[in-house]
Amino acid sequence: MNTSHSNPPKLLLRFFKWFCDPRLHKYLEGDLLELYEYNIEKQGLKKAKWKFSWEVFKLFRPGIIKSFEGTQRLNNYGMIKNYYKVSMRSILRNKTFSFLNISGLSVGIASCILILIYVNNELSYDTYNSNYENTYRVIHYYGEQGAEPNFSSLPTNEYQVWGNAPAAPSMQSFFPEVHQVFRFTSDSPWLISYNGITFSETGILFADSTAFDVFDWKMLAGDPKTALVRPNTVVLTKELAKKYFGDENPVGKTIIMDTEDPFEVTGVVEVPSNSHFFFNGLISMSTFKNRRPGIFDSWGYVDFYTYFTLKPGASIDILKQKVPEFLEANYTDDQNYYIDFEPLSDAYLHSEAGRQPGAIGSIGNIYIFTSVAIFILLIACINFMNLSTARSVERAKEVAIRKTIGSQRSALIYQFLVEAIIITLIASLFAAVLVFAGHSLLETISGKTLPINWLFSIQNVLLGLAAVLFIGVVAGSYPAFVLSTFRPITVLKGSFKASSSGIWLRKSLVVLQFSLSIILLAGAAVVSSQLDFLQKYNMGFDSDQMLVVDFGYDGLVQQKREYIKQRFNNHKDVEMASVSRAAPGDFFPNAGTGITDPISGEIVYKGPAIYEVDEDFIPTYKMNIVAGRNFSDDFPLDSANALILNESAAKLYGYSNPEDIIGKSFEQWGREGKVVGVVKDFNYVSLHEEVEPLSLRFGTRYNVSVFSLKINSQDFSKTLAELESIWQEIIPHRPFDTRFVDQNFNAQYESDERFGMIFSIFSGLAIFVACLGLFGLTIYSTAQRNKEIGVRKVLGATTTRIVALLSKDFLTLFIISLIISIPLSWYVMNSWLDGFAYRISLGFEIFATSALITLLVAFITMSFKTVSAALSNPIDSLRDE
Amino acid sequence: MGKYQLGEFEEIVLLTVGVLFGDAYGVSIKLAIEEKLNRKVSVGALQSALKRLEEKSYLTSKEGESTSERGGRPKLYFTLTAAGRDAIEHAREVRNELYNEIPKIALDLKMV
């Protein structure tokens, strides 16, 4: 017996002791132990142990669990129960105040959580990669600073993520620290056909076979090791695979790309939505290498993004130090070329490099959103405190009675805190409902998938509870710590008025609320007028009804180019047609271009962007020639030896007067000739940036991919259908793939617009919450002055005078808030606008308007109560005197 | 029924306490029921029944000796009170009465 005696499961006994009613514990434990011994003898140790746990588990039932009232701590439990009871009574008795408090707080908390979801998603970009901390990308600088530019001091967009092909393999062989290198090219459209269906797909990249070593994209089918190794293989995203293959397994199937090449599908991949670049398909880099092997040795041909991972323990700083050595060993032709490395963690929010592979976020916006979240919550908490201070006179009697009966101050503090926490808890329950309702709306507005699951991790739920506690304590701090100090004698004698410190606090809180509201409203106004400005900005060319027909460098289209153009031109609704490599708003390559220097007379090389256009391009887009002439059929040699620049490019080469550069020699991509014209600067990339230097060259023999059609039509869809039938007649194999130039541009402002929308909505909510509080305060102050109003009316005061009297206090507070908030919001919004090269200037009127709107909203809110008070019959208020 | 409220399991426990007269404590009651009625009884279910019966004052309890196989824990002995005895008797009478009122034919039919 002694052998088995010592080992009943200790942990279970402790657990049992924890939940068991202490009055029963010793007998029950005895029973359990006796049964345990009995079972060991009858059924063996293992079964006895199992039975023992089962019995303990079944003992966890009412009647045996110790009661919540406790045994020793009866008094405390009882008190908390009492606090709860009293709080609920007080909440239910003052329905208006509770409603204002709870609705304000729930809107505040819900907004805060929604913003948190958004911000969390922004911060989570690329973190799905297990090698996140150890992944870097190469950024390239093609400039004039000579060797070793200081990247951090270079202006935004002066250096690029976009670079050459040979950097990657050279780095891998030069730096022993580099583990995996991965390159991909700019996205381009491809025609994909399978089983007779053909679509033009954008976002197709050529990618190295190391793609899945560097990025943790999930392969749903296919082998990540070999998928991108052989030429003419392609990996599709889940969405694209579904589009062509439905539920079939696409791996091993053959699709036709660009009408002639069979490609084998070797994988299906899923890319998380929080990736800083996105694609629809990856074609093996070896395909590209077979087609244009020369590019892979050319440091001057720029169309690659290079990412790499470091070996564990290696330091990026050592790599950075060895860059000059690296360039010396691998590439010395261009003294102005330099590289640097950027961590993947900076790619989405912190990168200032130009030519990003995808849309980037803005850390500034994150700060703005976070402040808005804090503001809204703050405004809601202020409401709570204000309403509580306002009601302090009423509550003072309760406090006085409690004190007289013998309540201690600490007990009163607890009582008020419990009340505040209960209100916060109720508010957060409503907030949870609002979050679920608002979540899909936020997803629609932000255009992102915002996962909500992370909110429910144990850690976050605990954090949420802590936050509720915190908000409750903050919001309840004034009533708790000030009301509890009231002296019963003064209160009960009837001479008690709200303390002056209370009034002072309330006033300053109102000022704070107004200030925050004005700042938010002014912010929203500035954002929306800036966006409006961008959309109406004169780009320097005609983008209205400008249709782009994209044929993706299709050789068959190219052969019939002149005929198609002529057929388009013959259509009555087409003003003019032109063919070019790309349309404004698209992506452009840069070209090393040499032009005679005005001082030294030598050829100086720079890297302006290059447009390849025909002679109709400039007239079609109604661009202005400021010096020289357009390309023309009258000069048959134009196609070989003429170049047109924009004003910025002329300045880049040292010619501030465009006339002076006409006739100067140039050398570009192996062609030589004279500059024949300068076109007025037009915004071809985005208004976030200054107009970049640009060269237009006459080149339609290769490398053209779009028609631009200036349409002049009343019935656009009819015109479009007619143009499509012309296209299908000549080019039956290719869909009529069109877009609008202004769409191209608007896409660039989409993220700004979404930012503006989210910002306005939350600012609106903040103002709504502030108004709830103001409404409550007005109810209170008019109720307090009920008798005064009655007396004044009896003595002959007009309604207007009474309304003015009641509003006067708030007006003063409002003016103080104006003085505080306007300089603050001017400063903040000015720095936001600095992110735009073309921006509105901050005029007085924006602030005046937002102040006026806030005042108006506040006044309307107040007038609900003041007017009714002023109109009320004095008999009602004076009767009981 | 009225004043005597007794569930089926409570009745069995009450009867067993009576049977075990003087030696009725948790484990002995449990084992007795398991043996006589051939049904499993958990300590938890038994204890809540005992506690309910004590609250209805059909049972009283008294701390007994502690033994070494119980890890030094005392036993809690239960005995029937007068009210408990009345409750059992009442239950029995009600059952007998009902049984006697069953028409003979109903019982015969069941035999067929």
Image (cartoon, grey):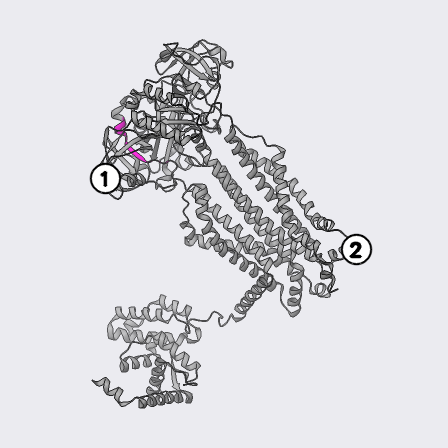
Note whether residue A322 is visible.
no
Q: Who is closer to the viewer here, A529 or A335?
A: A529
Q: Who is closer to the viewer here, A530 or A421?
A: A530
Q: Amino acid at mark 1?
A: Val
Q: Quadrant of the N terminus of chain A?
A: bottom left
Task: Name the residue rendered at 42%, 54% in the picture.
Answer: A458
The quarter of the picture where residue A592 lies is top left
Q: Is residue A391 left or right of residue A27?
A: right
Instruction: Specify the label residue A795 is tagged with.
Output: 2
Q: Is residue A14 above or below residue A155?
A: below
The crowd level at tag 2 (other Cα within 10 Å; few <14, some 14-19, many 20+) is: few
The quarter of the picture where residue A668 lies is top left
Judged from the image, the secondary structure of the residue bearing numbered disc 1 is: loop
Upstream in sequence: badge 1 or badge 2: 1
- Magenta region: A277-288
Residue at numbered disc 1: A251
Q: Is residue B58 above or below residue A188?
A: below
Q: Quadrant of the C terminus of chain A?
A: bottom right
Note whether residue A717 is visible.
yes
Q: Cα distance, mark 1 to mark 2?
A: 91 Å
Q: Who is closer to the viewer here, A167 or A776?
A: A776
Residue A37 in the image: state x and y as whole percent. 29, 74
